[in-house]
């Protein structure tokens, strides 16, 4: 009797472990990578080099810099006193910057992304290899196209900033992102990638062992069938 009661308990444990692993891997979508940084925090913590950026992450640079890569070669350099958050949307990645400055590079044939500063949106123009700079100072926004062209949209109106040109406009900076409360940090801050792999493998191994024991002790005629992918 004790033996039979133990098997359902083990199955329940396996189920909980499997749910934890599934939750970890079905969390926020990755949007890029923090290649390296100095004087920066990611969701309030000091990041390691080549840390994966997830949708919803907040990157703050105090006195230093941070290098970020997005999909298909899009890159950006965040300077001192810069606060930016990353969000994966249906049509590309949105980088919301509430303070600071950013240099960006956009290959001609790559996925779209945009930088949102208050009520202004800056994006590389289609069909161009683009390099540019976006900087905020005392409520004013300065947008410069070093190469290619940038599209600047505000209040439904769009301006194109071509190579070598700079425009300055006023903007309403958004409220700073709410810090991530304790206990709600991304799974990457709690477990390393290899730990997740070991946890998943352990759950699968334990589940297989329990299934074999259950089948062999409760139904002599039963056979073990591999699950359908």
Image (cartoon, rainbow, N blue to C red):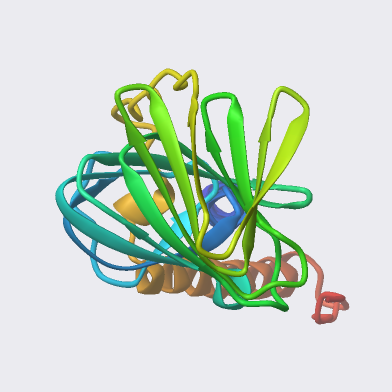
Residue at left 42%, top 18%? 175
Q: Nearer the viewer, residue 131 or 36?
A: 131
Q: Nearer the viewer, residue 124 or 197?
A: 124
* Residue 69 versus residue 11 in the image, above or below: below
Rendered location of residue 87, percent (x, y): 58, 44
Rendered location of residue 183, percent (x, y): 33, 31
Is residue 24 visible in the rendered image? The answer is: yes
Residue at left 56%, top 37%? 116
Rendered location of residue 126, percent (x, y): 76, 64
Count of numbered marks: 0
Is residue 5 visible in the rendered image? The answer is: no
Quadrant location of residue 38?
Answer: bottom left
* Residue 62 versus residue 38 in the image, above or below: above
Residue at left 72%, top 78%? 109
Residue at left 33%, top 27%? 179
Q: Quadrant of the C terminus?
A: bottom right
Q: Nearer the viewer, residue 86 or 126?
A: 126
């Amino acid at each position: 009797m004790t033996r039979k009661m133990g098997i359902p308990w083990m199955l329940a444990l396996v189920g909980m472990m499997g749910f934890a692993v599934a939750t970890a891997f079905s969390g926020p979508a990755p949007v890029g990578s923090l290649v390296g940084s100095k004087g920066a925090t990611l969701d309030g913590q000091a990041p390691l080099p080549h840390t994966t950026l997830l949708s919803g992450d907040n990157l703050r640079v105090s006195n230093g810099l941070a290098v970020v890569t997005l999909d298909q070669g899009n890159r950006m350099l965040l300077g001192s006193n810069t606060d930016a958050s990353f969000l994966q949307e249906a049509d590309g990645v949105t980088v919301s910057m509430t303070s600071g400055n950013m240099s960006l590079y956009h290959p001609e044939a790559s996925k779209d992304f945009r930088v949102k500063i208050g009520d202004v949106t800056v994006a590389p123009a289609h069909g161009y290899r683009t390099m540019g700079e976006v900087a905020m100072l005392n409520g004013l926004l300065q947008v410069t196209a070093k190469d290619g062209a940038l599209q600047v949209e505000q209040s439904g109106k769009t301006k194109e900033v071509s190579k070598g040109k700079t425009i300055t406009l006023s903007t309403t900076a958004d409220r700073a992102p709410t810090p991530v409360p304790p206990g709600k940090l991304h799974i990457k801050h709690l477990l390393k990638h290899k730990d997740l792999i070991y946890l998943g493998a352990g759950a699968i191994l334990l589940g297989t062992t329990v299934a074999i024991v259950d089948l062999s002790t409760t139904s002599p005629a039963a056979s073990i069938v591999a699950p359908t992918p």
